[in-house]
Image (spheres, helix red, strand yellow):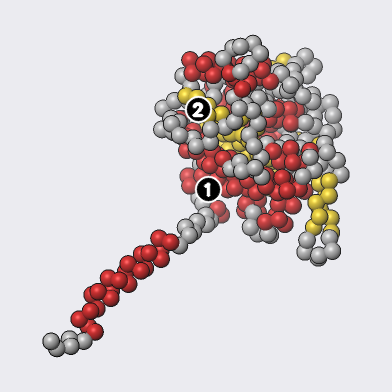
Amino acid sequence: MKNRGYLTYYPYFAFCLLLLVAFCFSCAPTRKVAVDFQAVKFAERPKNIIFLIGDGMATAQVSAHIYWMGIGKTIFEKFPVVGFHKSHAYDYRVTDSAAGATAFACGQKTTLGAIGVLPPDNHPCPTILEDLDRQGFATGMVTTCTATHATPACFIAHQELRALTEEIAFDYIHTPFDCLIAGGENLFDKRYDNINLVDSLRTRGYVVRRGTSFKNLPLDGSKPFVNFTHEMEPPTALAGREYLPRATRLACDFLKKRSEKGFFLMVEGSQIDWAGHTNDRHWLRAEMSDFDKTIRAALEFAASNGETLVVVTGDHECSGLGLTQTELPKQFRPSFSTKVHTAAMVPVYAYGPQAQLFSGIYENTEIYFKMRAALNQ
């Protein structure tokens, strides 16, 4: 048999080469395409607002995060608009999460520990979540703490003291909302009064689930839902908690389907504050990294439609964090001066339609009015 040359086997060589290329691509790690946040064309006004609160986060915590991650690598450095708010409460220069979140939710200063009520007689104040729900907006909250913790509670409850957690849980039954992802299931179904609020939620049409797989939720927007991530407080980011970025994007997609008018979503990185209270730099680093990913998820959603305003801030500073020099010229040492809150001003980051409203220095109450002004209200 005559030798017909290498050309005879060319089709086989080509086929094998194609298989090899396909194999290499299948084994290669998936590379996420970077979003050009600056190239998005925005609507004149937002249809949706995503309000992210890093509890206990101020300039020092963001600075530490930037140096830990590497300059130019964090999501905070992507924001085109930055301002500062003065966080003091009605009665004290140093605030707490209850008074701080009430200022955001109601647009008025209140006393330490107060949840959605105002001095001098602790009368309830309507929150931005309640107002927008009445107008037909979809509303929701996602947190890494219990649903009854101070920050989420201030958007939906009205109680004289933040410690009244069982009463705060009751307010979830009386205040309409579309989705909640948080810890604290025991405060709803294992109560001292033996009232099962989980059953009450189901009676009101809510789908109630538990865990962090987020399976069997009505993500088509057909029904409101509550997803408890833990019986009480969710674990730390150091201990493997990682649901916040995914839950934030899931909530955005869900709320968009719930109402043609738009939505309001509050997201809290709750445990930045807890890391500050314990002066634990490793915990703080993990929580800031998790919050960075969460903000990125919100910005990616906003960039995908051009109709979403994203506002990021903290309610107060915690731990009096300092960034001091070490023996290595490009390193720093986290230095904690206290285990409680401080009166430091807090940065505000904004992206999307009407983001320019959030530049400058102003009271924390102005964030409420700026969000309303962005919606032309």
Task: Determine crowd level at label 2: few under 14, some 14-19, many 20+ residues with C-alpha closer than 10 A.
Answer: some
- Residue ID at (38%, 64%): 23
Which residue in the rendered view is the most extreme toward the front?
1
- Residue ID at (45%, 31%): 217
- With 275 as the anchor, is 23 left or right in this view? left
Q: Secondary structure at mark 2?
A: strand
The residue type indicated by label 1 comes to: Glu
Task: Determine crowd level at label 1: few under 14, some 14-19, many 20+ residues with C-alpha closer than 10 A.
Answer: some
Q: Earlier in the sequence, mark 1 or mark 2?
A: 2
Residue at mark 1 = 300
Q: Indicate the position of residue 296 as horizontal and vertical percent values.
A: 58, 48
- Residue ID at (50%, 27%): 209
- With 39 as the anchor, is 344 left or right in this view? right
- Residue ID at (81%, 36%): 341
Residue at mark 2 = 209
* Measured Cα–Cα span from mark 1 to mark 2: 26 Å
Q: Indicate the position of residue 36 as horizontal and vertical percent values.
A: 53, 56
The residue type indicated by label 2 comes to: Arg
Q: Which image quarter: residue 313?
A: top right
Q: Quadrant of the C terminus?
A: top right
Q: Nearer the viewer, residue 64 or 111?
A: 64
Relative vertical location of residue 139 with respect to residue 347 in this rendering, above or below: above
Relative vertical location of residue 320 with respect to residue 194 in this rendering, above or below: below
Q: Indicate the position of residue 98 as horizontal and vertical percent values.
A: 73, 27
| Residue 306 visible | no
Q: Quadrant of the N terminus?
A: bottom left
